[in-house]
Image: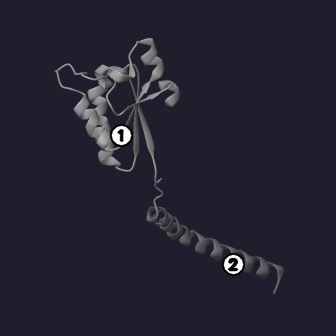
């Protein structure tokens, strides 16, 4: 065998290997997404914080809480209110249509949603804890709680 024969045989072998590799790559690429789909990693525990600083947005936020709970029953949902957002969590608070917020809040509390109010806001606005709905927790700072 001459040097030219060895070089041509080597080239043919290399070209053959490259061709086989080229044919197998699409199969490898197709197999990869299937493996990824087989075991989607979902965290077991998720927490979402909703903040509210304007009580006029409370009804929309309550709807969002309901939708969130329906989509992910395992998520821990926390509402943090400060500034004007605490108003809907006061005893006797009503929306612009005269509907009480308390029953809606109670429904969410029964489902595990936690409601927290900023103590800084309570002090600044001279709101006593007794004015809050029963299941509302007071935290030192609403912003820090977030």
Q: Nearer the viewer, residue 96 or 127?
A: 127
Helix, strand or loop at label 1? It is: loop
**Residue 25, can we see it?**
yes
Mark number displayed over residue 113: 1
Q: Could you tell me residue 110's position as x and y percent?
A: 30, 43
State the quadrant of the N terminus.
bottom right
For this view, does 94 lie left or right of residue 113?
A: left
Q: Nearer the viewer, residue 107 or 127?
A: 127
Q: Earlier in the sequence, mark 1 or mark 2?
A: 2
Residue at 53%, 68% (x, y): give it.
28
Q: Given this view, does label 1 or label 2 mark the residue nearer the observer? A: 1
Rounded to the nearest angstrom, the CA distance separating label 1 from label 2 is: 67 Å
Mark number displayed over residue 13: 2
Q: Is residue 71 above or below residue 139?
A: below
Which residue in the rendered view is the most extreme toward the front? Answer: 130
Q: Nearer the viewer, residue 11 or 59?
A: 59
Residue at 43%, 39% (x, y): give it.
48
Q: Is residue 28 above or below residue 61?
A: below
Q: Nearer the viewer, residue 132 or 130?
A: 130
Write down the quadrant of residue 117 in the picture: top left
């Amino acid at each position: 065998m001459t040097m030219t024969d060895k070089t041509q045989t080597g080239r043919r072998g290399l070209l053959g290997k490259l061709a086989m590799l080229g044919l197998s790559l699409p199969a490898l690429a197709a197999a990869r997404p299937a493996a990824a789909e087989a075991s989607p990693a979902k965290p077991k525990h998720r927490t979402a914080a909703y903040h509210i600083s304007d009580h006029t947005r409370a009804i929309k936020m309550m709807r969002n809480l309901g939708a969130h709970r329906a989509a992910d029953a395992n998520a821990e949902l926390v509402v943090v209110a400060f500034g004007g957002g605490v108003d809907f969590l006061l005893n006797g608070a009503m929306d612009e249509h005269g509907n009480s917020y308390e029953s809606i809040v109670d429904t969410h509390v029964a489902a595990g949603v936690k409601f927290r109010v900023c103590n800084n806001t309570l002090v600044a606005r001279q709101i006593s804890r007794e004015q809050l709905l029963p299941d509302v927790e007071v935290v030192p700072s609403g912003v820090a709680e977030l």
